[in-house]
Image: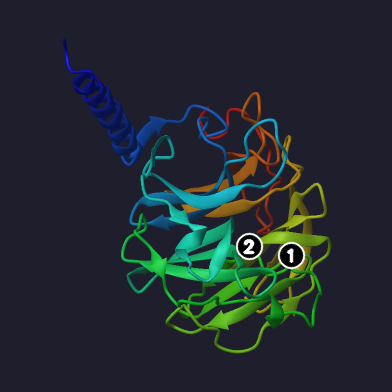
């Protein structure tokens, strides 16, 4: 008679080996060619931010994990994608998790990565574990694809720092950082009220007071960039959200409101954008809820469409398309 425990051992070994193979595969980079919007069709992603560095575009996005058909925000981590030609993309195995910040209890909301003096700084929105409300943290790495570690061991911005402007618990979200031509870095953020402050050269401390910016129809998702002599501050407006923008000749304002840039994102109440120049072209990177059949505002999708400037520096309204930049 055969020993039944031998067979059980073989089965257990097979299951373990198979499970290990799946885990190992999940830890590898994944490369694919995008042919239309949404750019990534196998995973739900929202709140994209983009970094151009050394001939490569890096896209950082929150991972929407809400199971269909449920309707709520479930985001535990941020994912990294890169491309050198805006056609072939690589999803990198490394992810930054909200709980990598030991002072946070989760909720991986909008974020952005920027390079300064050879280091890469990832500014994130999380829920603070002990201070009520949303907070902004910062992680640092020697590489744009990680690994990243908490650069402070504490939050950079907490909700109690802005209560003189609004009493809501979620106004300190959606960080974006811009480094001006003179090397001075600025942090912009905010929901219902837009804020900005200077950063010290270490990129992990404020260098002065927090200033409010009054913008018409402002909701959240600020993004600051410069093109030519103009500074641009784009943001999500009203709800459901469209993207509007303002222009200025100075990073400190005054900001001239220019109106709608991108209409309501299909099948998504939120809208969130990144604007970059890359190899002589300009791109508008955003999310909608277009992945069939379960895409929605809680299961979002990254899209990219071309962006065009007019002679006076203003931006032509973005046309959201299925073809995107892949025509």
Q: Residue at x 73, y 35 (%)?
A: 267
User: x and y percent of residue 160 in the render?
Assistant: 70, 80
Q: Residue at x 72, y 65 (%)?
A: 170
Which is nearer the eye, 160 or 131? Answer: 131
Q: Residue beneath label 1, please?
A: 191
Residue 177 position by quadrant? bottom right
Counting other residues with Cα less than 10 Å from the Cα at mark 2, is it few (<14), some (14-19), or many (20 or more)? Answer: many
Which quadrant would the N terminus be assigned to in this image?
A: top left
User: x and y percent of residue 214 in the render?
Assistant: 79, 73
Residue 232 position by quadrant? bottom right
Question: Which residue is the extreme one toward the top?
Answer: 1
Which secondary structure lies at badge 2?
loop
Vertical order, 228 against 318 (above or below): below
- What's the distance in space between the residues labelled 1 and 2, CA to CA? 8 Å
User: x and y percent of residue 129 in the render?
Assistant: 60, 69
Label ID, residue 174: 2
User: x and y percent of residue 256 in the render?
Assistant: 76, 68
Q: Is residue 128 visible?
A: yes
User: Which comes sooner in the sequence, label 1 or label 2?
Assistant: 2
Q: Is residue 60 visible?
A: no
Residue 142 position by quadrant? bottom left
Which is nearer the eye, 57 or 98? Answer: 98
Tag 1 near tag 2, CB within 8 Å? yes
Q: Is residue 57 left or right of residue 187?
A: left
Counting other residues with Cα less than 10 Å from the Cα at mark 1, is it few (<14), some (14-19), or many (20 or more)? Answer: many
Which secondary structure lies at badge 1?
loop
Q: Is residue 108 left or right of residue 70?
A: left
Q: Residue at x 70, y 41 (%)?
A: 297
Vertical order, 183 against 324 (above or below): below
Question: Which residue is the extreme one toward the front?
Answer: 1
Which is nearer the eye, 4 or 104? Answer: 4
Tag count: 2
């Amino acid at each position: 008679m055969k020993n039944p425990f031998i067979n059980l051992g073989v089965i257990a070994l097979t299951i373990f080996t198979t499970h290990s193979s799946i885990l190992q595969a999940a830890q590898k980079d994944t490369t694919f060619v995008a042919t239309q919007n949404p750019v990534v069709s196998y995973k739900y992603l929202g709140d994209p931010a983009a970094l151009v560095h050394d001939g490569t575009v890096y896209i950082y996005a929150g991972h929407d994990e809400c199971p269909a058909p449920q309707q709520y925000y479930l985001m535990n981590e941020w994912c990294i994608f890169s491309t050198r030609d805006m056609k072939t993309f690589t999803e990198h195995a490394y992810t930054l998790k909200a709980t990598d910040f030991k002072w946070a209890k989760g909720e991986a909301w909008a974020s952005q990565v920027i390079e300064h003096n050879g280091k890469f700084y990832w500014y994130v929105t999380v829920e603070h574990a002990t201070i009520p409300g949303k907070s902004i943290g910062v992680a640092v790495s020697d590489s744009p694809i990680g690994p990243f570690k908490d650069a402070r061991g504490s939050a950079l911005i907490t909700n109690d720092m802005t209560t003189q402007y609004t009493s809501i618990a979620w106004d300190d979200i959606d960080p974006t950082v811009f480094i001006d031509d003179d090397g001075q870095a600025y942090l912009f953020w905010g929901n219902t009220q837009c804020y900005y402050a200077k950063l010290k050269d270490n990129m992990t401390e404020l260098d002065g007071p927090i200033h409010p910016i009054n913008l018409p129809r402002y909701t959240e998702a600020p993004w600051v960039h410069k093109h030519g002599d103009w500074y641009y501050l784009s943001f999500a407006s009203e709800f459901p959200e469209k993207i509007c923008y303002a222009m200025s000749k100075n990073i400190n304002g005054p900001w001239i409101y220019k109106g709608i840039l991108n209409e309501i994102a299909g099948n998504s109440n939120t809208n969130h954008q990144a604007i970059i120049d890359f190899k002589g072209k300009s791109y508008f990177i955003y999310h909608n809820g277009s992945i069939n059949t379960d895409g929605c505002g809680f299961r979002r999708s990254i899209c990219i469409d071309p962006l065009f400037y007019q002679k006076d520096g203003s931006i032509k309204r973005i046309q959201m398309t299925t073809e995107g930049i892949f025509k």
